[in-house]
Image (cartoon, grey):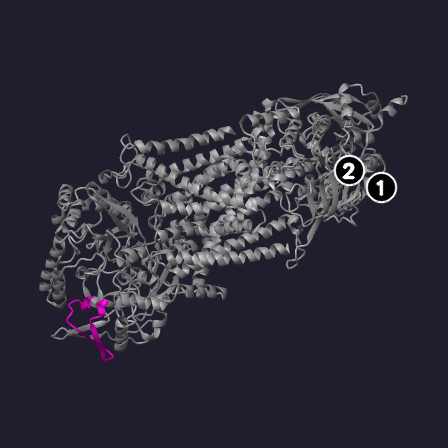
């Protein structure tokens, strides 16, 4: 199963490398328009062709990778940053009002139709990458809170936690010192999954015009721009579509591979 | 069970009350005025004021919130600002598309996913499993709107097997209705089926590791019999959870798909209403969706009880 | 003529040898006990017979049931034999039953799978009979009951019913009583013995408990590292113990430690009328939650330098009591005093450091991500001025040395240690801040007999060196008997008997104590056996 | 769906030698937006007029496809010498769809309603000059003005001045009752509206028995629907890039006409640095109109150099005055003291002319050192922030009202152009009825706003429609928002 991890890692690494490379070099300026050269199919000059404004698709894909990664990464960061402490707190005080409030709050967020809320958020604050991040990030919070709580609860029953309590440590300190490191594997795996979902969500929001705004290239908006031109210039939809699919595929494979590699049950077999 | 029910109903009520406040607040602070939107650029301030008065927008926010919630409690969801028809009726019309679409997609998803998941679990680690899991990875990675675009391109424009979109209504007959919803349902079902197949597989694999599966084999059941008789029902709990989540997702999540196939569904109603600042429609429909999600979750919990006798003993 | 013949059985799993050259025979109506410590391959031998082996297993040799070589049969033929010609009972009754099917359905399934002619009615009638035979008459335990509505012992009876429903010629029982309390164990063993006698079945009994073996089996096979080291009629094996390993096993099982004399009584811990209850499920939505009383007015005192035992079956409240003493759960009534200071509700650090604990599970007691030095110095948290630098290293080295480990071990991770070593580390952790009281919570229950004997010796050594005071909680009477001066017997949340260990075991006053002691299987007196002439 | 049946019917009809026209008496017309409701007199939504104008509702006068104003419910009229009183004679035998007779009382009701205190008419200003509407007899009605207005007949042709009956006004939004050649039959919200022929129509009977309006907002879906022949006509096709394909396909015809929409880069004349005419002039020279038309509209659209429709006889071509010249733009900026450029905002409403055009303009402005931050907004937000709040630097919008140069005379209008000379010019124009004089005044007005570089004048928005090859009689241009069904027929 390490094959999955390698394949996923390679795909994700490729996308990351592309994004990083775009910081210092792209084949063309991704914002430079050349309207007479629009809708060129891929050729030697433009490896992935040009879009409806004659911009170089390859350059846009590279910079678009940066947008996708940045949005998804920060959204996962928000989800983890808020969700993990909430999950730890809920598990530390299982059954208390705090646990109840946190878990019911989670259910409530889950109950909201996420896309509708994202649209509302952008209607209130205007479209843009930051607001897309917030919209995606909010829905990541309950995911991480649940995973953390779910992973932490059985740990609280383990003897080593009891031993730490007998050693006089506070619940907060035990959460930080013993629980968090032991749910880290779960969080890494979930983080990878949420990261890939974040990329899909960013693409979806940009597709309906609510993500990163022009002139910042974004895969979702490239698809939205391409949609009426698919039959004229199929590469316009195929190129960003494949970029999204390969990135998400890579991240998911990596998540699966990590899960297998880090699965606590498998660890126990090795002990 | 009774305790459980009461607690669930209580938390349901609290959730809905909180949701109504959140929804109202978010919708109300969105910039834009429905009256001005209706009247366009040449309207004069007194005309806008007259329309605002006619729509009841000149009242205070608290009064409007209370009127809205009070109305909903008595079954009145208000009247659309732009369409000037009762929201309840509009929603009922749209549900005729969205509900069957969600149901259709869910059925497709389950029909594809469960056999695929079972097949993969039964052949764990063998080429069949690898192929199915590879396909599900791909299914999850494909953005559904992109997939929808491709479906239209191939099946509606090139092959002309299906209409490119639109929905004539159920008056045109059940078959015509299903035919019109087939492509959208496939586009919606694909990623869901992929997720469900993975859940089915891993749930089954978990169950296969349980002691009672060994007991079943010791009785003389073949691997397949043990899987069917003892594995499936135990694996059903995580699968049910996901199915419940998916139904609520499908109900609201079809927005983009409804757009691509220009279906007169709930998602498109919300989209239109948001851009027209038809606040009451947005509020009521979002509320309804939240309600639907909570009710579906509740139904899923009841389904657990049907599946798992351990939960029945809570009385 | 043997019913089951195992000849030169070799088994590898993913290429790793597990069994090598096993030869065993069981005749109809005979009980063969296969015994040995963990990893000896005794369970794999059982699964080889059932041909229910994990993926990647390859068996060679011959396993003949009634002359038919099971290794040469197809999967379909094996399915036909399993459940009909050979049945199996497993160790863990709590998980061996399908939780979403009623017990009737599960017993009927065995019948209907092999007898296509049996309709639901007939199968039901036969399930009725079988369940009655195993002591679950449907009048009291309807067929529609679900597993979670039964106790562990009752569930094990259902598993047995499923295994014997078609009166198989061979029954394999894999540690069938290990997860059960002694009194339940005695009943299940009694049941198995009766069924063997009634049906003339052959029983292959896998167990680690030599006392059970001695009591039950006609023949014994002692296994170690995938080989049978000694086999023969029970009495002969018990008497002769030709193989050194057998001798070691028996010695370890009856190991008695040499405790130093206890000092004159000075009260250390005083528990007075302690009550501990927690909320249960509401009977109906508007009813208040009933309180479940786990500890109902327990009082006792523990003296400085005393070794106190606490015995009782599962659910008697001994774990709850332990947690209350450790200050892990709030108490609802009564008081706990240490050296005259109350630790009932709040435990100040200064007092907390006087009580440390050693838990049962050698695998779950340590954070797998920390090194040993960090693990055992965790209680330093309780010191106002914890040692640092060289002082800390010395403290770690001393603690490890005291429990028989090397100072170098401080830098290793916990997964590099065996179960016995981990319990030593747990003791080091408890000792490192020199507490006045150590609680051993089933501290040796998960260990093999030979390892257990060494840990018990360690405890005795520590008593000599440091004058330990401890509370030793266990369900295993023989262990408690050997390492305590005084014993408390707990039943249903109350202490029913309290007295000097020797007295209590020799002349129990309370009927419950009496039942416990009677139910516990004991090894026969070896010298007496030796005096018999063969 | 219906298509297979229709095809079957066609084949049958053809094989029997009967006229195919028999089957082709109905049509499905798609448009991008769905009407919010069906009352053209209380909303600005063009989608309403696209369905009801001249089909369900009629006014005293009406627009024809070529932009001319002709009599409608008013058979004829006389204008008093002072230009203050218009006396209309109504058509005979006009009934509403509910069977009631349309008479002068209904005209009075409709016009009074439009200009009333609590009116919610979106174009109330157009009718504010009317001081009195009086019924002379059932067939005659007199309209009195406060001051002469050369545009009254034009204004009365708007959909906002159609004649409605007091009896049916309550349900007008969902069940409109008018006098037109088609009656409203059904509305499946979110999907379609169906009309059928009014057998009692007072004028010439239209060719089609019934018509269905379908609403397809997504451009991709629009393309797919036409390609798959789900619809017969798509008026105002939203994706100009697809027209090449339709043009090349013998199944379809593409109609390229003109709308009344002057698409402009609206500039906030009161916000620095745009209060400096030099900066506005620099802006004008920084923009390459042809690139925008090619890039955003795929070549459809006529460049304009002022705020006036090129198809209007009074139009003056002033595009040369603001030719693309980035060097000049940079020089002008330097002259204005902004050699280093500056930053501003560019608010873009949803239509693709704005969103795509905006991207191109932002790139062009970047070439001369102006950084325009693109802010995509919905219409509701645009109306709130840009139009009402005047909180913007630049925006792109198509002003689709016919003959709307008058907005430059309103200093509080969102781009806030305040020029007393221009305001005086417009006042003169309103009071002038002579066509030649009006043309001269309009030319002067066009020149004035071009000289002041009030806004960046981009192009006249093209009216793009796609229809099946056999459809005849569609309006090529869009002098007002309308789909005049009475002219449409299938080729024999």
- B123 lies left or right of D208: right
Judging by the rendered image, the residue that carries numbered circle 1 is C509
Residue drawn at x 29%, y 67% as measured from the top left: B47
Picture coordinates of residue D149, whole percent (x, y): 16, 69
First in sequence, mark 2 or 1: give its number: 2
Q: Tell me the residue that label 2 is attached to.
A: C487
From the image, which quarter does the C terminus of chain C lie in? top right
Q: Quadrant of residue C397?
A: top right
- Residue B46, percent across and down? 28, 68
Nearer to us in this view, B299 or A38: B299
Task: Assess whether residue D148 is covered by the magenta stretch.
Answer: yes
Q: Which residues lie in the magenta part?
A: D125-154
Q: Residue at x 72, y 48 (%)?
A: C145
In the figure, is residue C384 to the left or right of C521?
Answer: left
Q: Chain of mark 2?
A: C
Quadrant of residue D423 within the rendered picture:
bottom left
Query: Secondary structure beneath disc 2?
Result: strand
The span from disc 2 to disc 1 (Cα, nearest Å) is 13 Å
Tag 2: Cα neighbours inside 10 Å, few (<14), some, or many (≥20)?
many
């Amino acid at each position: 199963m390490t094959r999955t991890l390698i394949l996923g890692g390679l795909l994700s690494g490729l996308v990351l490398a592309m994004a990083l490379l775009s910081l210092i070099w792209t084949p063309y300026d991704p914002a430079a328009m050349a309207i007479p050269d629009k809708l060129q199919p891929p050729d030697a000059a433009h490896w992935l062709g040009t879009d409806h404004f004659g911009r170089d698709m390859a350059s846009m894909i590279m910079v678009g990778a940066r947008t996708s990664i940045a949005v998804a990464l920060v959204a996962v960061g928000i989800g983890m940053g808020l969700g993990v402490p909430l999950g730890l707190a809920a598990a530390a005080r299982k059954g208390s009002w705090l646990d109840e409030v946190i878990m019911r709050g989670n259910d409530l967020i889950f109950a909201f139709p996420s896309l509708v809320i994202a649209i509302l958020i952008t209607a209130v604050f205007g479209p843009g990458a930051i607001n897309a991040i917030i919209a995606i990030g909010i829905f990541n919070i309950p995911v991480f809170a649940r995973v953390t709580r779910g992973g932490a609860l059985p740990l609280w029953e383990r003897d080593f936690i009891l031993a730490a309590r007998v050693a006089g440590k506070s619940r907060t300190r035990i959460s930080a010192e013993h629980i968090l490191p032991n749910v880290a594997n779960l969080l890494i795996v979930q983080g990878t999954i949420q990261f890939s979902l974040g990329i899909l969500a960013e693409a979806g929001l940009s597709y309906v015009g609510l993500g990163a705004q022009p002139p910042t290239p974004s895969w979702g908006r490239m698809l939205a721009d391409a949609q009426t031109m698919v039959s004229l210039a199929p590469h316009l939809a195929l190129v960003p579509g494949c970029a999204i699919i390969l990135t998400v595929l890579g991240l998911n494979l990596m998540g699966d591979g990590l899960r297998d590699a880090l699965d606590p049950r498998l660890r126990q077999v090795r002990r | 069970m009774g305790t459980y029910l009461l607690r669930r109903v209580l938390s349901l009520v609290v959730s809905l009350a909180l949701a109504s406040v959140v929804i109202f607040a978010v919708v109300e602070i969105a910039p834009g005025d429905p009256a001005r939107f209706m009247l366009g650029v040449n309207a004069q301030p007194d005309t806008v004021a007259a329309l605002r008065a006619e729509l009841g927008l000149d009242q205070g926010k608290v009064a409007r919130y209370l009127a809205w919630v009070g109305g909903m409690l008595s079954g009145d969801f208000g009247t659309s600002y732009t369409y000037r028809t009762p929201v309840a009726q509009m929603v009922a019309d749209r549900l005729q598309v969205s509900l069957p679409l969600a149901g259709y997609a869910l059925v497709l998803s389950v029909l594809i996913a469960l056999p695929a998941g079972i097949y993969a679990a039964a052949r764990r680690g063998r080429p069949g499993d690898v192929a199915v899991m590879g396909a599900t990875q791909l299914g999850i990675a494909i953005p559904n709107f992109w997939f929808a675009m491709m479906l239209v391109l191939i099946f509606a424009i090139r092959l002309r097997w299906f209409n490119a979109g639109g929905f004539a209504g159920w008056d045109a007959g059940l078959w015509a209705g299903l035919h019109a919803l087939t492509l959208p349902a496939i586009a919606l079902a694909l990623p869901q089926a992929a997720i469900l197949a993975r859940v089915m597989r891993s749930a089954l694999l978990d169950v296969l590791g349980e002691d009672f599966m060994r007991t079943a084999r010791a009785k003389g059941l073949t691997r397949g019999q043990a899987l069917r008789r003892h594995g499936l029902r135990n694996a059903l709990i995580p699968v049910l959870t996901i199915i419940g989540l998916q139904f609520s997702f499908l109900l609201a999540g079809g927005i983009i798909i409804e757009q691509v196939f220009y279906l007169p569904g709930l998602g498109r109603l919300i989209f239109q209403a948001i851009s027209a600042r038809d606040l009451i429609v947005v509020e009521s429909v979002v509320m309804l969706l939240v309600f639907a999600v909570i009710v579906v979750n509740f139904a899923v919990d009841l389904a657990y009880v049907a599946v798992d006798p351990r939960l029945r003993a809570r009385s | 003529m043997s019913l089951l013949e195992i000849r030169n059985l070799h088994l590898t799993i993913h290429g790793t040898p597990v069994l090598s050259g096993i030869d065993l025979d069981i005749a109809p109506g005979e009980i063969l006990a296969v015994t040995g410590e963990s990893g000896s391959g005794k369970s794999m031998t059982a699964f080889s017979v059932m041909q229910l082996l994990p993926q990647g297993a390859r068996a060679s040799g011959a396993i003949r049931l009634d002359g038919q070589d099971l290794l040469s049969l197809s999967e379909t033929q094996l399915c036909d034999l399993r459940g009909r010609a050979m049945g199996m009972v497993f160790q863990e009754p709590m998980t061996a039953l399908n939780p979403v099917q009623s017990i009737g359905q599960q017993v009927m399934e065995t019948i209907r799978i092999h007898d296509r002619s049996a309709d639901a009615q007939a199968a039901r009638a036969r399930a009725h009979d079988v369940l009655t035979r195993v002591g679950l008459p449907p009048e009291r335990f309807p067929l529609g009951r679900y597993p979670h509505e039964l106790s562990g012992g009752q569930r094990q009876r259902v598993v047995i019913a499923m295994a014997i429903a078609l009166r198989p010629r061979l029954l394999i029982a894999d540690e069938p009583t290990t997860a059960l309390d002694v009194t339940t164990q005695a009943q299940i063993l009694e049941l198995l013995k009766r069924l063997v006698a009634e049906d003339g079945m052959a029983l292959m009994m896998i167990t680690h408990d030599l006392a059970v073996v001695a009591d039950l089996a006609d023949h014994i096979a002692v296994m170690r590292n995938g080989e049978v080291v000694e086999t023969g009629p029970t009495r002969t094996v018990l008497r002769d113990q030709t193989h050194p390993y057998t001798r070691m096993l028996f010695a370890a099982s009856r190991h008695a430690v040499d405790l130093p004399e206890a000092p004159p009584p000075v009260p250390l811990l005083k528990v007075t009328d302690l009550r501990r209850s927690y909320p249960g499920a509401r009977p109906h939505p508007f009813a208040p939650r009933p309180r479940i009383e786990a500890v109902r007015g327990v009082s006792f005192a523990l003296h400085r330098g005393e070794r106190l035992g606490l015995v009782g079956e599962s659910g008697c409240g001994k774990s709850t009591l332990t947690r209350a003493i450790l200050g892990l759960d709030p108490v609802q009534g009564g008081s706990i005093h240490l050296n005259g200071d109350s630790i009932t509700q709040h435990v100040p650090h200064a007092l907390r450091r006087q009580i440390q604990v050693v838990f049962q599970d050698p695998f779950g007691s340590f954070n797998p991500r920390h090194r040993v030095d960090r693990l055992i110095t965790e209680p330093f948290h309780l010191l106002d001025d914890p040692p640092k630098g060289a002082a800390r290293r010395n403290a770690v080295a001393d603690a490890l040395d005291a429990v028989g480990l090397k100072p170098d071990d401080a830098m290793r991770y916990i997964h590099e240690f065996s179960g016995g070593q981990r319990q030593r580390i747990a003791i080091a952790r408890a000792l490192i801040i020199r507490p006045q009281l150590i609680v051993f919570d089933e501290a040796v229950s998960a260990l093999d007999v030979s390892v257990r004997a060494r840990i018990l010796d360690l405890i005795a050594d520590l008593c000599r060196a440091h004058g330990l005071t401890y509370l030793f909680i266990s369900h295993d009477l023989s262990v408690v008997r050997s390492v305590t001066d005084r014993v408390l017997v707990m039943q249903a949340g109350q202490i029913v008997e309290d007295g000097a260990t020797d007295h209590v075991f020799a002349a129990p006053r309370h009927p419950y104590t009496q039942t416990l002691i009677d139910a516990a299987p004991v090894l026969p007196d070896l010298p007496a056996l030796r005096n018999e002439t063969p | 769906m219906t298509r297979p049946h229709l095809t079957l019917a066609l084949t049958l009809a053809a094989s029997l030698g009967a006229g195919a026209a028999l089957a082709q008496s109905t049509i499905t017309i798609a448009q991008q937006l769905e009407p919010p409701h069906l009352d053209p007199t209380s909303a600005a939504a063009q989608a309403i007029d696209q369905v009801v104008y001249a089909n369900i509702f009629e006014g005293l006068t009406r627009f024809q496809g070529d932009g001319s104003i002709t009599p409608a419910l008013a058979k004829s009229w006389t204008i008093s010498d002072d230009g203050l009183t218009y006396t209309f004679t109504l058509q005979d035998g006009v009934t509403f769809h509910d069977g009631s007779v349309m008479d002068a009382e209904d005209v009075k009701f409709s016009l009074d309603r439009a200009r009333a205190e609590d009116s919610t008419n979106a174009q109330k200003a157009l009718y504010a000059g009317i001081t009195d509407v009086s019924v002379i007899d059932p067939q005659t009605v007199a309209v009195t003005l406060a001051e002469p207005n050369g545009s009254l007949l034009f204004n009365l042709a708007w959909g906002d001045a159609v004649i409605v009956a007091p009896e049916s006004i309550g349900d007008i939004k969902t069940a409109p009752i008018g006098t037109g050649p088609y009656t409203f039959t059904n509305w499946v919200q979110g999907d379609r509206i169906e009309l059928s022929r009014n057998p009692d129509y007072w004028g010439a009977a239209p060719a089609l028995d019934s018509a269905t309006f379908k609403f397809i907002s997504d451009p991709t879906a629009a393309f797919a629907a036409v390609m798959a022949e789900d619809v017969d006509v798509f008026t105002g096709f939203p994706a100009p890039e697809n027209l090449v394909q339709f043009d090349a396909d013998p199944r379809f015809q593409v109609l390229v006409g003109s709308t009344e929409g002057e698409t402009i880069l609206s500039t906030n004349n009161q916000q620095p640095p745009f209060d400096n005419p030099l900066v506005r002039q620099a802006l004008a020279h920084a923009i390459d109109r042809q690139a925008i038309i090619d890039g955003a509209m795929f070549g459809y659209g006529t460049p304009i150099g002022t705020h006036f429709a090129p198809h209007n006889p009074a139009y003056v071509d002033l595009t040369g005055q603001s030719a693309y010249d980035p060097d000049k733009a940079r020089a002008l900026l330097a002259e204005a003291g902004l050699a280093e450029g500056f930053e501003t905002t560019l608010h873009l409403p949803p239509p693709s002319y704005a969103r795509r055009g905006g991207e191109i303009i932002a790139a062009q402005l970047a070439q001369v050192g102006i950084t325009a931050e693109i802010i995509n907004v919905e219409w509701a937000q645009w109306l709130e922030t840009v139009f009402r709040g005047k909180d913007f630097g630049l925006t792109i919008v198509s002003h689709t009202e016919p003959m709307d140069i008058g907005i430059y005379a309103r200093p509080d209008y969102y781009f806030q152009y305040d020029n007393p000379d221009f305001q005086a010019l417009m006042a003169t124009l309103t009071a002038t009825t002579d066509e030649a004089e009006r043309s001269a005044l309009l030319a002067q007005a066009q020149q004035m706003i071009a000289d002041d570089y009030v806004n960046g004048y981009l192009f006249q928005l093209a009216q793009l429609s796609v229809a099946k090859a056999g459809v005849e009689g569609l309006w090529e241009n869009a002098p007002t928002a309308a789909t005049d069904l009475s002219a449409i027929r299938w080729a024999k």
